[in-house]
Amino acid sequence: MLHSLLSRAHRHGLVSSAEAHCDIPCKIYDTAPITVAALTVVRMIDVLEDWRKHRPEDDVAFMNTVARAVAQKEEHAAYVKDAVVVIWGDYFKAPQIEKYPQIHGLVHDIMLKGSAVKQGVNRDDAVKLVELVNEFAEIFWATKGVKTKRAVCPYPPSLEVVYVDL
Amino acid sequence: MLRVVRIAGTSMSPTLEDGDFVLVLRRVALGRLHLFGAPRPGDVVLVDHRSLGAIVKRVERRARDGRVTLRGDHPLSTSSAHLGAVPLGAVVGRAWLRISPRARPARIARGRPSRRRDELVA
């Protein structure tokens, strides 16, 4: 009775709402896909450079392959930015930030470098993005007390990346 | 003195369910000195949160500087680490009466605030 009266008042905008929302803390966070995406950006720039040197006769086929490589570069750079923001925003809380206050600056650097590799084809920018992701991965795993090691990935572009050392 | 709000969401379940109404007794204070309705640990309160807007949560504890830590009753509620400690001034008042479509209006009991295990690391 009272509830239906108030429901009517609410529908007429006379009673406001108070949020009691949930977030789902799924706890599945891993930096490995981010590393792979950053490596892909470097690889796509290498592929583009390779095609510049061995440009095929067929212009349309050439443009097609270039467009596909650029699209992949764009997509993987966007993924790096999105996935880093999710871990930084959802996982990092006051205790982790107090221990690693440099995380904000590092995430911001990744955002800038992530945009730079979308805008251009500078390999140094892409290699730097991989290194920034490495630093992010090391801090992330350190907050969980998980050991990491650095090793050269066993596939092109053969750059040093961070692996969990379980 | 009184305010009525409608609950949206399930973070206070089972104490309050989505669609319930609550009567809020406004806090009356001169600065930190309360004449009425000082929020105590375990109270369900309406808070004017800086980034989240009007929210209803349970008081976990009150720090010496007056700041209030909040939590939801449901295990999937946004953790108190995420909500942050809110200044006392953000606490509008205590949720006093629950008006549910399924039951008679009932007083909202002061609960036992307990720390959740996953609060420090999500």
Image (tube, coloured by chain):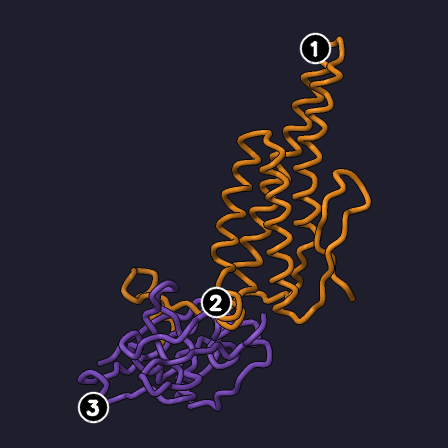
> Dividing the picture into quarters, in which one does residue A140 lie?
bottom right
Chain letter, purple: B
Q: Which mark is residue A21?
A: 2
Q: Would you say A148 lies left or right of B93 here?
A: right
Q: Is residue A138 above or below residue B17?
A: above
Disc 1 marks which amino acid?
Asp
Label 3 crowd bin: few (<14), some (14–19), many (20+), radius 10 Å:
few
Where is residue A39 shown, x and y percent of the image?
A: 69, 42
Q: Which mark is residue A59?
A: 1
Residue topped by disc 3: B35
- Considering the numbered disc 3 on the image, is that residue within a helix, a strand or a loop? strand
Residue in the picture at 74% in, 61% down: A164
Q: Nearer the viewer, mark 2 or mark 1?
A: 1
In this view, which residue lies farthest toward the top? A57
- Asked if disc 3 and disc 1 are in contact, CB closer than 8 Å, the reply is no
Where is residue A103 shown, x and y percent of the image?
A: 51, 59
Label 1 crowd bin: few (<14), some (14–19), many (20+), radius 10 Å:
few
